[in-house]
Image (cartoon, rainbow, N blue to C red):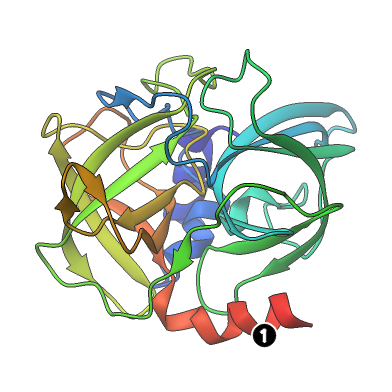
Amino acid sequence: MSRTAISRLVAAVLTVALTAAAAVTTAGPAAAVANGEVVPEGHYRFSVKLTMTGIPTADGGRRNSACSGALIAAQWIVTAGHCFRDVDGVRVDRPVADLTTATVGRADLTGDNGEVATVVTVHQSPTNDLALAKLDQPVVGIMPVRLSRRAPQIGDVLRITGYGADNSVDPTPSTVLRTGQVQVTEVADATVGVTGYQPRPDTSACPYDSGAPYFVEPPRHHGRHHGGPWLVAVESFGPGCPHTGVETTSRVDTIADWIDGVIRN
């Protein structure tokens, strides 16, 4: 589902504070973090590539698409709600493609690191463009990212990882995980607005980065991070990439209890 197409749909149908819906129509796939950096194998292993094959279209046909996400429990991932929507663009509590697979812990998709599982169940957030997807089997040997329960603050620096494209012109999902840093510029009840920070001011999400995790990393000690990271939000929608404008993401802290409840049941 093209992040560019979704963005437009969201803007039109969802000027609601639920940027979540916007993500549902996410402005097309998010281009593997435009003007970001390639992630070395073995880093940010909780990052997820979602591959959807055989999504029904309004004319009775089928199309393929992709999203990004993050592992938050052995058998659960988080992504954008709009990654699961029917032919009318409505987010639904089920996989919409004939087959939806999650590749976890593989920075270079041409390799064989990590694990691949099938999405079997979907739960849409009640407040924003975020969805939880259950896998058919637990992911072993990969540490899930933890949920932040702290409200984000303007000025916070977050890191994004995604498998999207690198621009909005005829975007194609990336075969490698890319990353960059952004800074929080807006905080709303259900969403967080961010802008590019490092390595460039126009480092930004692109098509197929929908659902990509934005997380905070703890300070480094002796060259290594300790005590984190913590998931703050997931990619929803934004301008054509790369860009220096505001990207809208869906907050995690405000629905952390709901997420815990879904995973426990």
Q: Quadrant of the C terminus?
A: bottom right
Query: In the image, what residue type sits under mark 1?
Result: Gly
Q: For this view, does 190 lie left or right of residue 183? A: right
Q: Position of residue 161 (x, y in %)?
A: 40, 39
**Residue 218 image position (x, y, % from top left):** 23, 59
Q: Residues within 10 Å of mark 1 (few under 14, many from 20)?
A: few
- Residue at 63% of width from left, 15% of height from top? 111
Find disc 1 in the rendering and name its residue.
261
Query: Could you say which is closer to the camera, residue 140 or residue 251?
Result: 140
Q: Count of labels shown?
A: 1
Residue at position x 58%, y 36% from top?
A: 105
Please give the name of the residue rendered at 90% of the width and 33% of the height, measured from the top-left corner.
60
Q: Position of residue 121 (x, y in %)?
A: 82, 61
Which quadrant, please, contains the N terminus? top right
Residue 131 vs residue 142, the one in the foreground: 142
Q: Secondary structure at mark 1?
A: helix
User: Which residue is at 78% across, 54% downward?
Assistant: 138
* Relative to 232, 59 lies left or right: right
Q: Is residue 93 left or right of residue 113?
A: right
Q: Quadrant of residue 261?
A: bottom right
Observer-nearest residue: 122 or 6?
A: 122
Task: Report the residue that reaches farthest toward the front.
Answer: 222
Residue 3: percent from the left, percent from the top? 50, 37
Does residue 235 sit above or below 258 in this rendering?
above
The residue nearer to you, when weighing 138 against 89, is 138
Q: Is residue 110 left or right of residue 39?
A: right
